[in-house]
Amino acid sequence: MPKDNTTTEGGIGAATVRREDIRFLTGEGNYTDDIRLQGECHAIFVRSDVANGVIKSIDTSTAEGMPGVLAVFTGEDFVEVGGNPAGWLINSRDGEPMKEPKRPVLAHGKVRHVGDAYAAVVAETREQALDAAGAIEADIEELPAVINMASAVAGGGLVHDEIDTNVCFDWGWIEDNRAATDAAIKAAPHVTTLELVNNRLVPNAMETRASMGDYNAGTGEYTLYTTSQNPHMSRLLICAFVLGIPENKLRVIAPDVGGGFGSKIYHYGEEALVLAASKKLKRPVRWTSTRSEAFLSDAHGRDHVTKIELACEKDGTFIAFRTETMANVGAYLSNFSTATPTFLHGTLMAGNYTVPNVYVNVKAVFTNTVPVDAYRGAGRPEATYSIERVIDMAARELGMDPIELRRKNFVKPDQYPFASAAGLEYDSGNYDLQMDKLEAMIDRPGFAARRAESEKNGKLRGLGLNAYIEACGIAPSNLVGVLGARVGLYDAATVRVNATGSLAVMVGAHSHGQGHETAFPQVVAEMLGIDPQSIDIVHGDTAKIPFGMGTYGSRSLAVCGSAVVRATEKIIAKAKKIAAHMLEAAEADIEFEAGNFSVAGTDKSVSFGEVAFKAYIPHNFPIEDIEPGLEETAFYDPANFTYPSGAYACEVELDPETGKVTIERFAAADDFGNIINPMIVTGQVHGGIGQGIGQALIEQTAYDDDGQLLSASYMDYAMPRAEDVPFYQVNHDDGTPCAHNPLGVKGCGEAGAIGSPASVVNAVIDAMQSGGKNVTHMDMPLTPSRVWEAMNAKGV
Amino acid sequence: MYNFEMTRPSTIADAAKALKEEDAQALGGGQTLIPTLKQRLAIPSTLVSLTGIGEMNGVCMSDANEVCVGGATSHAVVAREASAYPGLAGLASHIGDPAVRNRGTVGGSLANNDPSACYPAAALASGASIITNTREIAADDYFQGMFTTALEDGEIITEVRFPVPEKSHYEKFVQPASRFALVGVMVAKYADGVRVAVTGASEEGVFRWTEAEAALSANFSADALPDLSISGDDMISDLHGSGEYRAHLVKVMTGRAVASAA
Ligand SMILES: Cc1cc2nc3c(=O)[nH]c(=O)nc-3n(C[C@H](O)[C@H](O)[C@H](O)COP(=O)(O)OP(=O)(O)OC[C@H]3O[C@@H](n4cnc5c(N)ncnc54)[C@H](O)[C@@H]3O)c2cc1C
């Protein structure tokens, strides 16, 4: 008989410890590079060491004859297949569609960034492949590199000869608001103008990318094991656009994945290569990126150069935001690269405010650098940083308190749904409440004393804060379709109740650090009144899960979790029918509570487990009316984005002699709507803030004029470490539930990275000003040398 | 990595012999050499591991009041056992992370002479003697520019003798990414004068800041420094700071080292 597992302990709201961590922390995880297949061989990519060059010839003859070498590929081998496409079509202000140069599996004709792969060697061992890769002789004529965006726009060399410009698109949002915004700014009593850079970042997931292709000559089926955040989208892109494999003949498995932060959303040429090579050789072909390759080939993040203007009344009432941004897309369009600076950035440029006029112009620019795409926050960190920096600057210029200036312009709780001037409809929120929570955490009255103490020790102290709003729960398909998305952004779940009452829940979302294996069962357990330990999540294998769109954009719980709810509701509806039969009662009289079906007004009941058993052993079962089995699928397409919001504060100490900034305190007040597992949410906020502090203080991606990446290893690219971050104060209580999804959840995965850089920089500017330095802005990262130079007027 | 042979001798004599083979190379803690091999930037035929040589391991005191450190002694052991020379123990305790400190060796660090490494500052500021399997080299003659030393091919650093100063301190300002020294200054006060060695800053590797030595020998106090100046012209200028910034830091770190000297 089924075991009795009716308990809601560990349901919605419980801070359940993440069950997946045990295997991760004890070395029992199963990552792509852990998988071993009979007969596997090894691919090594040959990458360009120049940023821009014409491939005159590639001589592979020596390499082909070397020990263990099985095959050598060049761009020539892939001219017949398709390119890796952009997933989002953006139209320019003049109505012209964006420029979409082909992104081939291997570079052909030209190499366009340092790290651009133009050949690959497959050999019996990795060492043999490396030896042979070194023997490939490529004659590449180096051309001047196009690195700086301003000069790329102004003309000069071209990244792609087949398009006559380096500007991918010139987008206006909302173009119809342009004239009104210009007029409002012209007439405004006060305008604050800020030019800033949102620095390029290298994602650096702990696990580097890895892929293994396995072609089965017997069945004609391919399997791709790969480090992906969304296996179904990779399959779709590889099949429909790149290799033309029938979709039913490709299975994509993304097993345990050690972090992604966006960089593993996309399909990359290495995946296509290992599949094609496996077909040719009839053997599994694997490739695992080194960290050095990762720096040169994983999609980078951010990289905006922006001018933002805030127009306001003398009393601080906002009149208009006008933004001009150049967004670096690198050498090729990565899958989401065109959506990130536009619909994930421009649409957020009203912030948390009732400002009536907003206009955003974004030029996406090709350069001879690694492609840039969505990275934790994706567009929204750039929006938040611009808005919240210029507001801080305006507060200083107007002599107003930065909190009061923000509060004065916040959308108020009675204004929802609120149509923002940047075209979104915010469904819920309470920005003043977040600011109240923040003020309760940061002991603002005590700041003066803390500053005095720092000054006694020869240090400066600054306090900076900001609000943020983001659009996530990506995304309503109808809306994004109108905006240019070439995919739908629903998600899907199948709930399978086994005969003995345990459950498998197959989800389209992919967990690579988010804790889905713990959080999703909490939802189902709560709904069914059963023990979450009897529920397992299945994800990351296109042969097992329904067609979903993966994990990014803080969408998993809000979108896929909603599909899980819908599928579970169907399970309950069917189970009620079965229970009615078992209890010989009318279906309408069946009540379901705490894992038990009972007949209203009687003591007759059956447990969920008994119903499941009946569904699979359908003796004495109304086969004519009810199908056997208990398994349901639901697809869920959200009605709107979700809008997490919050207020963050940072307190820094600055050593004026060295320029070193130390984060002394950091507080985050967030509104994520309802919370399923507060411990996981806290962890997500911690991690996000860590990344935001990294961006603000130390992460520096530098190219020289020739297009060489100067910060191409951990010797020069600084990642935040434990000693760089303080103990955080976080509070995500009292959220305003999302108004349109069944769980009332908003998503928490990116908030920390979105909300934190502005408060760090605001705090450092505050510290510098307190030290009598009239520094009103400096660009991230605020490394010691750059801060020192800014303070000593060396022109940073 | 290319294939190589590996030997693990137990005496200095055997190690010296093994290093006479063509393209043989000494292996200390491997914290610099192994990453180099992984990147295929070196092709030794044989690695001669020195860490199994008993006579090259450990910390002891000489009759001349020197802390004597075996060439294959790890940073962690120095940090723990060189308490007679707190400035030296403190320096060792801030190299890299625990894994690096448990593997990396003083001999490997000095043989490598990375311009941003910490030990060269200790050796130079202490006027240490670098003992090899064939001779004894004074620190002042040993460092010959970045990644360049007085060592001959196959010569092994078997021991380093650090005269114990009255007061000393190593002040390290870390490069944000590598956490090596962006600028590190070792100050050591001896009966016959003060020595100041600077690492991380110069294109030429570790150097003595003689002006500061003179000023501090007259008055061992941070107050002796403000009027001194040092040029950033020949200093390293990179992502992490200009020559001018480094020159500025040399002064600041020297002052802090003096203030903390114990
Ligand atoms: C993550 C990381 C952080 C680090 N941070 C710092 C830091 O903050 N400060 C710092 O100073 N260093 C730092 N290091 C370097 C570290 O101190 C190494 O120990 C040092 O560079 C080399 O010592 P090793 O024993 O590992 O030598 P190996 O890597 O084994 O060898 C280095 C070179 O020295 C030669 N060699 C080794 N031993 C001898 C010997 N006894 N005689 C002659 N030649 C020899 C080898 O042939 C080789 O050419 C760091 C290293 C890493 C990996």
Image (tube, coloured by chain):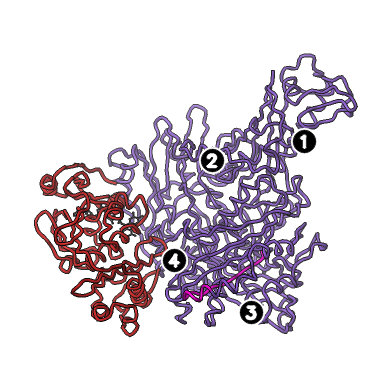
Q: Which quadrant of the figure has residue A480?
A: bottom right
- Residue annotated with mark 2: A21
Residue type, label 1 = Glu
Residue at mark 4: chain: A
Residue A135 visible in image: no
Question: Sequence order check: which comes first, mark 1 or mark 3?
Answer: 3
Q: Which percent across, then down, holds residue A277?
A: 43, 40
- Residue annotated with mark 3: A396
Which of the two discs, 1 and 2, sits closer to the camera? Answer: 2
Q: Which percent across, then down, holds residue A500?
A: 67, 22
Question: Sequence order check: which comes first, mark 1 or mark 2?
Answer: 2
Proximity of marks 2 and 3: CB atoms separated by less than 8 Å: no
Q: Which mark is residue A569?
A: 1
Q: Which chain is red?
A: B
Looking at the rendered structure, whether the residues under marks 1 and 2 are on a common chain is answered as yes
Give how far apart the Cα atoms at labels 1 and 2 are.
Answer: 29 Å
Give how far apart the Cα atoms at labels 4 and 2 are.
Answer: 35 Å
Q: What stretch of residues is rendered in magenta?
A: A453-468
Give how far apart the Cα atoms at labels 3 and 4 are.
Answer: 31 Å
Which of the two discs, 4 and 2, sits closer to the camera? Answer: 2
- Secondary structure of the residue carrying tag 4 is loop
Give how far apart the Cα atoms at labels 4 and 1 are.
Answer: 52 Å
Q: Residues within 10 Å of mark 4 (few under 14, many from 20)?
A: some
Query: In screen coordinates, is B206 left or right of A120?
Result: left
Most foreground residue, B225 or A193: B225
- Residue annotated with mark 4: A702
Give how far apart the Cα atoms at labels 2 and 3 are.
Answer: 46 Å
